[in-house]
Image: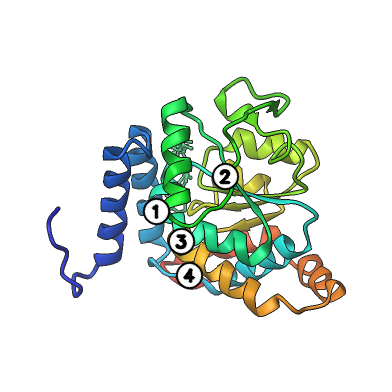
Amino acid sequence: MTEIPDDHPRAESLRTRHRIEDGVEKGITSKQGLIAEGRGEAFDYLLGERTLPSADDAERVAAAQLLLADHAVLSVNGNVAALVPGQMVELAEATGADVEVNLFNRTDERVDAIADHLRDHGAEEVKGLAADARIPGLDHERAKVDADGIGDADVVLVPLEDGDRAAALAEMGKTEIVVDLNPMSRSPRAAAIPVIDNVVRAIPRMTEHARDLADTPDDELERIVAEFDADEALAAAERAIRTGGDE
Ligand code: PTJ
C-alpha cells in the first residue's frame, strides 16, 4: 500500500478507501463494497468530509435511543466490518447493544470471517450466524436474521446499506437508526433517526454521546428523542450539499 502523507488534503478519505480494499482482500468486504465506498466518498466530499452540526445532534439522539432500548442490535455488513470493527464493539458496550452480522451478499465464509474479525476486535458474542428468523417482505439474503437478535430487537442501528431492509424493519415496528452519507437515499428516509455522516466519524461520536448520557434519567432521554425532527435533519444535510457547506 502506498504511504499516504498526513498533510495530503484528503488523507483520511484515502486511508478509508484502503481499509475497504484490505477488507476485500481478507474476504470480509464484498467487491460491491468498493462501489458503495465510492458512492459514499462522493457524498462525503460534497458534505466537506466533516460532521455537520445536524449530524452530531442526530448522533446524540441515536445514543439516547440506544440507551432507552429494551433490546438494541447493531447490524454489521462487510463495509462496516472493514471500517469500524472495534468502534462498533465499543458502541455496543457503551449502550448494552448486541452486534449482529447481516449481509446482502451473504455467504457462510463471509459471515464467519466477519464474526472472527469482530471477535478479534473485542466482541464477546456475535449474532447473525444462526439466521433462524426472517424479515417479512424481503426476498434476498438480508432477510436472514437471528430470532434472538434483530428478530427480537426494538431498536436497530443500520449503517450503510440499500433501502429495502430499512423499510421492512420499519414496517415490523422496529425503531431504526440509519447512518448513510446520502440524505436522498431510501434507507435514511425510512429511518426514525437518520444520521447523515461517515460511519468512521459517526460511530465513535455516538459512543462518546452514549458515555456522556449514561447516567441521564429515562424521561430526559425520552425528551431528547421526542424533540428530534428527522425531516429537518435530512433537509439540513441536503442544504449543506446544495450550498457547498452551509446548513
Ligand atoms: O457486505 P454486504 O454484502 O452486506 O454489502 C454491503 C454493501 C454496502 C455493498 C451493500 O449494502 C450495497 O450495495 O450498498 P449500496 O446500495 O451501495 O448503498 C450503500 C450506501 O452507503 C450509499 O447510500 C452510500 O452513500 C453509503 N455509504 C458508503 N460508504 C459510507 C456510506 N455511508 C456512511 N459512511 C460510509 N463510509
Badge 3: how crowded within 10 Å, few (<14), some, or many (20+)? Answer: many
| Mark 1: secondary structure | helix
Q: Nearer the viewer, residue 160 or 3?
A: 3
Give the amino acid at mark 4: Thr
Q: Nearer the viewer, mark 4 or mark 3?
A: 4
Do the residues under discs 3 and 1 have CB atoms within 8 angstroms? Answer: no
Compare marks 3 and 2 and give the one earlier in the sequence: 2
Q: Is residue 206 above or below residue 157?
A: below
Quadrant of the rendered image holding ligand 1: top left
Q: Residue at x 62, y 20 (%)?
A: 139
| Mark 2: secondary structure | loop
The x, y position of residue 98, in whole percent, is 64, 51
Which label is found at residue 241?
Answer: 3
| Label 4 – label 3 distance at C-alpha | 13 Å
The residue beneath circle 4 is 51
Compare marks 2 and 4 and give the one earlier in the sequence: 4
| Label 1 – label 2 distance at C-alpha | 17 Å
| Label 3 – label 1 distance at C-alpha | 24 Å
The residue beneath circle 1 is 83
Tell me: is circle 4 under 8 Å from ligand 1. Answer: no
Residue lying at the far right in this picture: please name it: 219
Q: Nearer the viewer, mark 1 or mark 4?
A: 1
